[in-house]
Amino acid sequence: MDNIFYSKLKSLRQANHLTQEQLANELNLRYHLNESKATISQFENNKRIPDLDRLINIADYFHISLDFLCCSANKAKDLEEVTNKSFFSHNLRKLREKNNLSQCELSKMLDVSNGAISKWENGQREPDLTTLQKIATYFDVSYDYLLRDRTVLLNSNNIIDENVIMTYDKPGDRIKKLIKKNGLSQKEFVEKFNEKYGYSDSEATISQYVNNKRTPEIDKMVKIANFFNVTLDYIMCRTDIDSDMSIYNKSRQDENKTSLSFSTPQEALSFILKQDMVADFGGYDLDNMSDDEIMEMADDIADMLKIISRKHK
């Protein structure tokens, strides 16, 4: 884990005002373990690495992702950003489909454009707070339901939330799906993986992984997640959202290629006002448009300019 875990654990413990002995006792009480102060000390001094089950216990206790616990700060930040977007996109789509609504039908219910729904579900945009309230009210769910991962298994009373999307996968099932999704055979995967990370695994070893007969150690699991550009939490079945980082990285590259992106309604409005041809056509009233509508209009104009630019290169 590139010596990330031990420093993260110590910081989390101190931030929660716990001694090593208190943390050990908390973990023992909540997860029926038998950890000691000495074990926590070994973890924090990088003398021992916990197994995957223990890592999950620690992540659950502090309400954090495995990626935050085990990955570098930059990757953890990137993953947090993309997974937060993915949670909303995923949950909105599930709610719409559960209610047998098309994107067009939902857009009419919320008084937004069909394009807005599409962008929300594809993770390209997020609604403003007013629209988010409309969505929550329409589907009779909370903000928390819309914005957070709903694959957390049990609450403190061991009662399953009726809205929770239960997952019955095991890590091997996830690895198998990712191999297939990327158009690889097990042999091709092990060859590419060994070459990239310097391992000497055999196809038989990978077969044991994907058939859940053996679980990779945590260092290797982190590298498998990196190889497929997904979160460690996805591979460990703590979420059903794969949060494919290749999509996120591509969007970042696209953003870097163009300045046609807007972080605030003010930026979007300024961009629209500079487009003389758009002003000549008219047919819209910026004074009566919501911030979300202004952002959407600016995005649509920018998208059209990008299409024209690509076509006439």
Image: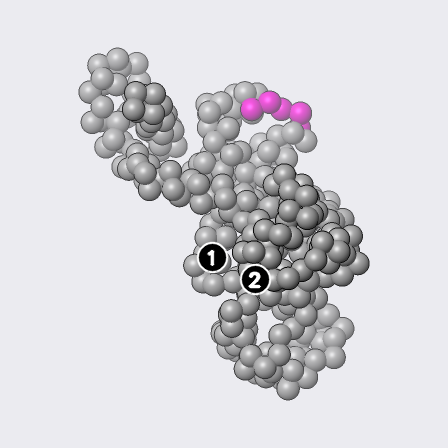
Q: Is residue 304 left or right of residue 153?
A: left
- Which SS class for mark 1? helix
Quadrant housing the C terminus: top left
Q: Residue 223, relative to residue 145: is it above or below?
A: below
Q: Tell me the mark number nearer the camera, choosing from 1 and 2.
A: 2
The residue nearer to you, when weighing 302 against 297, is 302
Q: Residue at point 22% right, 14% down? A: 280
Question: Taking 211 as reference, is 40 left or right?
Answer: left
- Left or right of 60, for residue 119: left
Q: What's the magenta region?
A: 99-103
In front: 304, or 115? 304
Task: Provide residue 54's location: percent of width, then percent of height.
Answer: 68, 69
Residue under the image location 62 percent in, 30 percent down: 96
Q: Residue at x 51, y 34 (%)?
A: 122
Locate the N terminus by quadrant: bottom right
Image disc number at residue 296: none
Color scheme of the displayed model: one colour
Q: Is residue 100 magenta?
A: yes
Q: CA distance from mark 1 to mark 2?
A: 21 Å
Q: Quadrant of residue 259?
A: top left
Question: Is residue 262 shown to the viewer in this render?
Answer: no
Amino acid tagged 2:
Gly
Residue denoted by label 2: 198
Q: Residue furthest bottom?
A: 38
Residue picked out by circle 1: 75
